[in-house]
Image (cartoon, rainbow, N blue to C red):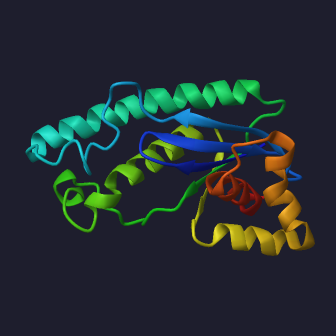
Amino acid sequence: MRLGIAHHFGWAVAVTASADHRVVDRRRIELVEPGVAAAPIHHDGKHLDDTAAADLVAKVRASAARAASAELDRLAAALPEPIVSMSLRAWPPDFPEDIEVRRRVPYEARADSVMYRQVLAELAHARGWDVHLYEAKDVERQAAAVLGSRADEVLDSPRATLGPPWTKDHRMALAATIMAG
């Protein structure tokens, strides 16, 4: 099974597909525990000093690790076969680690998002899953090229067979699993 993730602040769409690109599971997963700030740099930590912001980020990161880990465990337990890979939207490999730098433009708007992806990647590696990174703007087009004449059937038919929701996030996550193959 291949898992594709389309994440947002504090939650994500998770689509799991078989090697033949059949959607086996799709669900919303929570990436942070209830009551914990979902955007510690972009929103919740804006008016804090660097030390307090770093503490908030550490708290949110730990919460994200616990919440996402529990969600991934539930997902893996519900599947008929083991997950072999997780696909995540790519982030710059040189994205700064320093909290003071992350709080400045141009990093501030992306810092929370990168944190969630990094936590998910760490959790995938800890489970022995391969991690594949994708570019959101290109992944559906790339998957369609791989699928050829089957593209519409594979990327759009889950809405008819599974029912709503089947959104752009779902298609992107499914396309990412195809590119991981």
User: From the viewer's perspective, is 95 left or right of 154?
Assistant: left
Q: Position of residue 111 (x, y in %)?
A: 32, 55
Residue sitting at 20 percent across and 56 percent down? 103
- Quarter of the image containing the C terminus? bottom right
Which sits in the foreground, 77 or 42?
42
Total count of labels: 0
Q: Position of residue 93 (x, y in %)?
A: 43, 65
User: From the viewer's perspective, is 93 left or right of 147?
Assistant: left
Q: Judge whether 45 appears above or below 64 on screen.
A: below
Q: Judge whether 147 appears above or below 163 on screen.
A: below
- Determine if residue 84 is in view: no
Name the residue at the left extreme. Answer: 49
Which sits in the foreground, 159 or 4?
159
Residue sitting at 61 percent across and 31 percent down? 72
Q: Judge whether 109 appears above or below 39 on screen.
A: below
- Quarter of the image containing the N terminus? top right
Residue sitting at 70 percent across and 56 percent down? 171
Residue sitting at 54 percent across and 43 percent down? 12
Which sits in the foreground, 4 or 150?
150
Q: Position of residue 45 (x, y in %)?
A: 19, 44
Q: Judge whether 90 appears above or below 68 on screen.
A: below
User: From the viewer's perspective, is 179 left or right of 121?
Assistant: right
- Determine if residue 145 is in view: yes
